[in-house]
Amino acid sequence: MKVLLINGSPRQNGNTARALREVADTLEKEGLATEIFWIGKNPVRGCIACHACRNRDLGKCVFDDDIANRLVAKLPEADALVLGSPTYYGQPAGQLLAVWQRVCFSASKYVEGKPAATVAICRRGGSTAAFQCLNMPFEMLSCLLIGSQYWNIAFGLREGECVQDTEGLQTMRTLGRNMAWVVKNLHREGAIPPPPPEPGQYMHFIR
């Protein structure tokens, strides 16, 4: 059993990384393997809605010149996912959104139905909006959202400062224990599989 934690901050060892490490350490104490994947700080593409990934059934983005498909390659072996980001103007980091939207559209089959959680870091405010934004793709992909004792948020500005947010780090540990409990139960002998989806009935409101 393995959990993939995705660090969407341009700072490899910043507060987002520290919060995710708190979750990962807890998961490992519970017997699950973890990997923290860093999005990095090189340029990334946004989705251009070309649909080539789906038209060709690629299972990955048609553009292969940035980090997106390296993240896609990690998804099949992950039993659960944690997505973390700093808060910029009340939103998750732009580079993470650009990559994650492409991943969810082109490789949704590797995300669907998995236990998932998000983590938002901020200096002062806007984190609840960023947190909700991060959750929305998981909600659309029938993922099992894992909660904690509070929203999965921690506070800090300078690198590593979130260690002073003792409640925030406790929230991360509670998240880790809750996720481990769900993953273990889903993998136990006799676990009931999720219900099959209905055929899509997609529509819009332009008539």
Image (cartoon, rainbow, N blue to C red):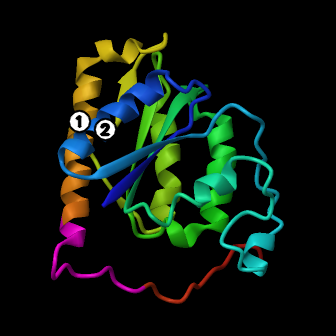
Task: Please identify the quarter of the rendering in which residue 60 is found.
Answer: bottom right
Q: Could you tell me which quadrant the N terminus lies in? A: bottom left
Task: Please identify the quarter of the rendering in which residue 88 is found.
Answer: top right
Is residue 24 rendered to the left or right of residue 54?
Answer: left
x 55%, y 27%: residue: 12
Above/below status of 185 relative to 24: below
Label 1 secondary element: helix
Q: Which mark is residue 23?
A: 2
Q: Which mark is residue 173?
A: 1
* Three-letter amino acid code at the position of disc 1: Arg
**Which of 207/198 is in front?**
198
x 45%, y 61%: residue: 139
* Percent coordinates x, y for residue 125 in the rendering: 47, 21
Task: Please identify the quarter of the rendering in which residue 23 is found.
Answer: top left
- Asked if marks 2 and 1 touch (Cβ < 8 Å), the reply is yes
Farthest bottom residue in view:
199
